[in-house]
Image (cartoon, grey):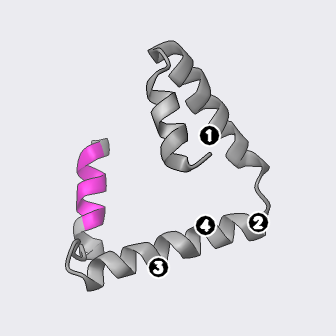
Amino acid sequence: MSLKDIETEIKKLDLKDRAVLAKWIVGSLDDLSETEIEALWVEEAEHRLDEMERGQISEIPAKEVLRRARAAIS
């Protein structure tokens, strides 16, 4: 079964069942080893770099990120 097939089946579930499934999926991430977690972060970083190189996203200076974060919590 492909990921697309799974997505199609999940969309057929009612909201409560999807929420239970989402909670289970997030909880299952706690079972990952440090090596698996690191590999996922590397994959995400490579994905974001690829998006930047294609011009799909742009950089945000650290000062701006911090300003937004401080504004969001105050």
Q: For the residues carrying marks 3 and 2, which lies nearer the camera in this image?
A: 3
Q: For the residues carrying marks 1 and 2, which lies nearer the camera in this image?
A: 1
- The residue that disc 2 covers is 34
- The residue that disc 1 covers is 26
Task: Kindly report the secondary structure that dominates the magenta region of the rendered protein.
Answer: helix
57 relative position to 27: left or right: left
Spatial CA span between label 4 and label 2: 10 Å
58 relative position to 62: left or right: left
Q: Say whether disc 3 or disc 2 marks the residue closer to the N-terminus.
A: 2
Q: Nearer the viewer, residue 1 or 27?
A: 1
Q: Say whether disc 1 or disc 2 marks the residue closer to the N-terminus.
A: 1
Q: Does the magenta stretch include residue 68?
A: yes
- The residue that disc 4 covers is 40
Spatial CA span between label 1 and label 2: 16 Å
- Where disc 3 sits, the SS reads helix
Q: Say whether disc 4 or disc 2 marks the residue closer to the N-terminus.
A: 2
Q: Which residue is drawn at 46% across and 22% down?
A: 12
Q: Where is residue 9 in the image (x, y as percent from the top left)?
A: 51, 30
Q: Does the magenta stretch include residue 59?
A: no
Q: Nearer the viewer, residue 41 or 51?
A: 51
Q: Residue at x 62, y 40 (%)?
A: 26
- The residue that disc 3 covers is 46
